[in-house]
Image: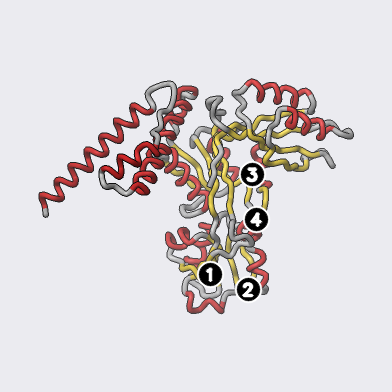
Amino acid sequence: MVRDMNNLEQIDSEILALLKKREQIAVSGDQFLSCDIESLLSSAQANELNPSFVKQLFRLINRETGLVYTQKLIAEKNPKWNNFKSASFLGPVGTYSYQALKKYCDSHNLHLDEISCGNFRDQINNVRQGISDLAFLPIENTSSGIINDVIDLLNDHNVYVIGEVVLHIVHSILVNRPETAGRIKYIYSHPQPIVQCSNFLSVHYPDVSFKYCDSTADAIKKVKEMNSDEAAAIGSDMGGSIFGLKPLISNIANQTCNYTRFIVIAKDPVKFPREMTTKTSISFTTDNKPGALSDILDIFRKYNYNMTKLTSRPIIGRPWEEQFYADFIANIESADAQKALDEISMNCRSLHILGCYPMDSE
């Protein structure tokens, strides 16, 4: 038995070494070399291996090796890319912002020092002051829409969006003791989850008092410390397990397909290879005249750019004037994107490029 285990460990070590060697060859040239999975299936059968297993295995190998190649291209254009050491999140540990950070690190093979913040402004200030290299902020949700506080902060601070994370959000009612759930009088959470779960709450908890907190994890922590049967929190099961609360009811959002898109911000913009499909975010203002916004939209149509988001926010101190925010699928390293942005700039009062970054598909 011991000898068999040793043999297996030796084989596994050899497989890992070969995977690393394969990765180095696949990403060493000017083009990423991916394997032809279909051509491997006959070899799989000849070796009495399940073809379905081999197909899944090499799809994963191709995907992971492709990610390594992409990171290599990005690092070649951005010397600071491999020097990110820390990230700010809306804390404490266990918030959805924290989960977005962990997902991003896992997909990019990053190991970052985690800095907890009490609000969005502190996160952005940490990046501006060099306290953290990155910050993870929610920008929109499929149930409650755009998060206006973050939009406003982006426009007021000199930071850039360099990435995004789409996170599946599953809200739960979390309590100290499920058997006494009928006594709930107070529900604690961040304002966003309360909005996102409004339908459920209006039916099942029409008479409770809502207590707003800086984050879902902060709410969970408070309810745990209170140790009261009259208090509950809305948050994730992960957050509940960290602080010792138990889920009473799960998946209570207005939409079962409830997703939040988080943006990753940094002090400086990142350039991505032209061949990468990216999203570009901008803010702009127009003259207060008929057709001003239509003129801008015509430019997107001219260059055949798909606009995935268009929203507006009032400009503080200028009544009835709006700041527009748009996301569109384009890489600003391309010549066409540069031409389009030049034309937009000439047809609007002000233009601010918030960032260009790869899209995350959940």
Q: Position of residue 281 (x, y in %)?
A: 65, 35
Kindly identify which numbered label has been placed on residue 36: none
N-term-proximal mark, 3 vs 2: 3
Q: Nearer the viewer's eye, disc 4 or disc 2?
A: 4
State if disc 1 and disc 2 touch (CB < 8 Å). yes
Task: Give the amino acid at mark 2.
Answer: His
Towards the viewer: 279 or 345: 279
Q: Residue at x 72, y 22 (%)?
A: 342
User: Dot 3, how many residues are within 10 Å of its Cα: few (below 14), some (14-19), or many (20+)?
Assistant: some
Kindly identify which numbered label has been placed on residue 150: 3
Quadrant the N terminus occupies: bottom left
Q: Position of residue 253 (x, y in %)?
A: 60, 62
Q: Secondary structure at mark 4?
A: loop
Q: Residue at x 84, y 42 (%)?
A: 320
Kindly identify which numbered label has been placed on residue 249: 1
Q: Nearer the viewer's eye, disc 3 or disc 4?
A: 4
Residue picked out by circle 4:
143
Q: Position of residue 87 (x, y in %)?
A: 48, 40
Q: CA–CA distance between discs 4 and 1?
A: 19 Å
State if disc 3 and disc 1 touch (CB < 8 Å). no
Compared with 346, 85 (above or below) is below
Q: Nearer the viewer's eye, disc 3 or disc 2?
A: 2
User: Dot 1, how many residues are within 10 Å of its Cα: few (below 14), some (14-19), or many (20+)?
Assistant: few
Q: CA–CA distance between discs 4 and 2?
A: 19 Å
Task: Give the amino acid at mark 4.
Answer: Ser
Towards the viewer: 104 or 153: 104
Q: Position of residue 228 (x, y in %)?
A: 51, 73
Task: Give the amino acid at mark 1.
Answer: Ile
User: Dot 4, how many residues are within 10 Å of its Cα: few (below 14), some (14-19), or many (20+)?
Assistant: many
Q: CA–CA distance between discs 3 and 4?
A: 17 Å
Task: Give the amino acid at mark 3.
Answer: Val
